[in-house]
Amino acid sequence: MPLPDDAAEARAQGWRRLAALHARIEDRLEKALQKQHELSVSEYTVLDVLAGQDGWHMRMQQLARAVVLSQSATTRLVTRLENRGLLRRYLCEDDRRGIYSEVTPEGRELLAAAEPTHDTVLKEVLAEAAEVPELAPLAAVIA
C-alpha cells in the first residue's frame, strides 16, 4: 500500500533539511580547516578516525566506510596524507592482502592543533542553525 503523499513529502522535507545543515557545517569546516591547518574536511576526518583506533587497525575498506568515501577516493586521500608524512601504511601481518594505515606523530600533532578549530566551528554553525526554525530540531540533536 503506497504511503500518503503527506508522509512522502515530510520525509523529503526532512532529507532536504538534513542536507542543508550538512552543507552548512561542511562548508564552514572546510574553509576553517583549510585556512588554519591546510587540511580538508575529509583529511581531518581520516586523521581523526585513524587516531581513534586505540590498539586496533582498520583496513582501507573499513576506513572508506567510516569516512563515507569510495574505496578509491579513500586510497587517494590516504596517499596524499602519507606523502605529507601524516600517515603511514603497512601490510597486515595475518593477511598480506590487507593494508593498514596509522597516524604518524606529525599527523597526531596536526590533528591536535586542528581539533579546537573543528569543535569551535561546529559549535558556531550548530548555534546559528538553532536560530533557523527549519534546522533547529536537527541542530539540537547534534549539539
Image (cartoon, rainbow, N blue to C red):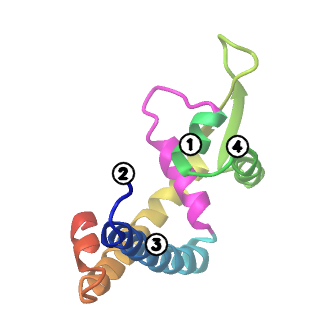
Foreground label between 2 and 1:
2
Which residue is drawn at the image coordinates 56% and 31% (left, top)?
Answer: 58
For the residue labelled by badge 4, is the local secondary structure a helix, a strand or a loop? helix
For the residue labelled by badge 1, is the local secondary structure a helix, a strand or a loop? helix
Part of the protein shown in magenta: 39-59
Asked if marks 2 and 4 touch (Cβ < 8 Å), the reply is no
Q: Which mark is residue 71?
A: 4
**Type of the residue with mark 4:** Gln
Is 49 within the magenta? yes
Looking at the image, which is closer to me, 79 or 14? 14
Across and down, in percent, residue 59 comes to 62, 30
Cα gap from disc 2 to disc 1, whole angstroms = 34 Å
**Type of the residue with mark 3:** Ala
Mark closer to the chain start, 3 or 1: 3
Placement of 131 over or under 90, stated as above or below: below
Cα gap from disc 4 to disc 1, whole angstroms = 8 Å
Residue at which label 2 appears: 1
Cα gap from disc 4 to disc 3, whole angstroms = 23 Å
> As drawn, is 135 to the left or to the right of 18?
left
Where is residue 13, by image quadrant?
A: bottom left
Mark closer to the chain start, 4 or 3: 3
Looking at the image, which is closer to me, 37 or 130? 130
Residue at which label 3 appears: 19
